[in-house]
Amino acid sequence: MRTYRELLRTPEFTPLFLAVSAQVAAATVSGLALGVLVYAATGSPLLSALSMFGPSLAQAIGAATLLSAADRLPPRATMTGAALVFCLGTAALAVPGLPLPGVFAIILGLGLVGSVGGGVRYGLLNEILPADGYLLGRSLVNMSVGIMQVFGFAAGGVLVSALSPRGTLLAGAALYLVAAGAARFGLSARAPRASGRPSVAATWRSNARLWSSEPRRRVYLALWVPNGLIVGCESLFVPFAPEQAGTLFAFAAFGMLAGDVLVGRFVPARWQARLGTALLLLLAVPYLVFAVDPPVPLAVAAVTVASIGYAASLVLQQRLMDLTPAEMSGHALGLHSSGMITMQGVAAALAGTLAQYTSPGTAIAVMAGASVTVTLALARGLFPRPGLGASPGHPMARSAADGSAKS
């Protein structure tokens, strides 16, 4: 499967695509509104960053306790229910006079729900598409994420000015309702991918099994840490340039979109793995310019170029699927999603703390330098050398990487 036309003809892909797109648009619009609302009320870069990325921290708890549900619950009902919970939670954040502890309690609760939702969505994507269509499908989904973020941040900036942050939060809640409708009426009822009841013990067992493979551990760390540190940079866009934050976010999303199109559609499969490490470095290096507090046009250019490097996640996710048994795909992708988003929350907190004691520009540059260091440390052995051993997608490669080879 090599064309988007083939992809869109695949049954159930389009409604899943629409549900994910609406949910991303909702998160983008409401996240910007919440960041502006909290920064205006507190003047704190740390609290502003945590309000936008704080749900990420709850993903760690969800990944440790709830993630077994990703393969053990019916996908359509779970996606619909999660979108409705986000709708109600976002509407609650718009209530006037809501105290700051109440704001963060709702944010953390939504993060717990989100820790399961990611695994359900992307496990279903892996189930809907043939084996050779996952990377292209995830590329198109990521393109939608980029487009929704470009327009979401632009529209969010307009809505914040026209409606106020609270009015923008209500617009985000309405978009979550659209996502729930697309999932409920567009997807077929499917049985869970795995048997058994979701439980903390089942989650721990599956997490331990996934983590027991050294190649998978390296892929997970490469998916989580360099990416998360750069999202920490993005969490400081509001304090760095309060009037132009929407522009910075929009161009970051545009760069991510461009990278996903190039890698997912035009780069031959044999070259994709070879570009993985280079893309991770590209993701961080341009942000080093923030050390000199660049003017906004230069900052926009750096952010746009750097965000092309987010396409590394496409290559790494394909590598993760090559290393993972099919019956654990939802859990594996959920662990990736939860770990990545958790790291983004941790990085946002760290970046906000650094900015409190230095400056937003300095903190951004420090986070980017840390991302470069981690990428270089993980690069060796991240991808198999061409022509050596079984191919990544070969069943024997899956079994050996899983540590449980069986005849």
Image: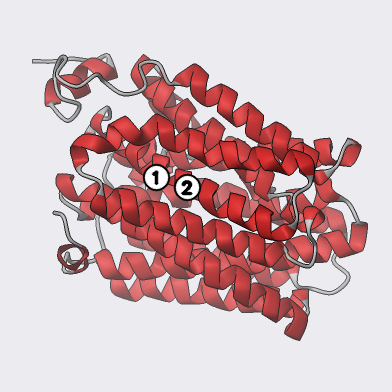
Q: Is residue 237 visible?
A: yes
> Residue 57 appears in which quarter of the rendering?
top right
Residue reaching furthest to the left: 407
Query: Neighbour class for label 2 at 10 Å: few (<14), some, many (≥20)?
Result: many
Query: Neighbour class for label 1 at 10 Å: few (<14), some, many (≥20)?
Result: many
Using the image, determine if residue 156 lies above or below residue 355. below
Dot 1 or dot 2: first in sequence order is 1
Image quarter of the C terminus: top left
State the mark number for residue 41.
none
Residue designated by label 2: 116
Residue designated by label 1: 70
- Distance in Å between CA atoms under marks 1 and 2: 6 Å
Look at the numbered disc 1 and give the secondary structure of its residue: helix
Of residue 214 and residue 148, the one placed in the foreground of this image is 148
Using the image, determine if residue 259 lies above or below residue 395. below
| Residue 242 percent across, percent down from the top left | 80, 62
Residue shown at the point (25%, 52%) measured from the top left: 266
Look at the numbered disc 2 and give the secondary structure of its residue: helix
Mark 1 touches mark 2? (CB < 8 Å) = yes
Image quarter of the N terminus: bottom left
Residue shown at the point (50%, 39%) measured from the top left: 282
Of residue 15 and residue 197, the one placed in the foreground of this image is 15
Q: Tell me the kind of residue under disc 2.
A: Val
Q: Tell me the kind of residue under disc 1.
A: Ala
Direction from residue 3 to residue 116 in the image, left or right? right
| Residue 295 percent across, percent down from the top left | 75, 56
| Residue 55 percent across, percent down from the top left | 65, 49
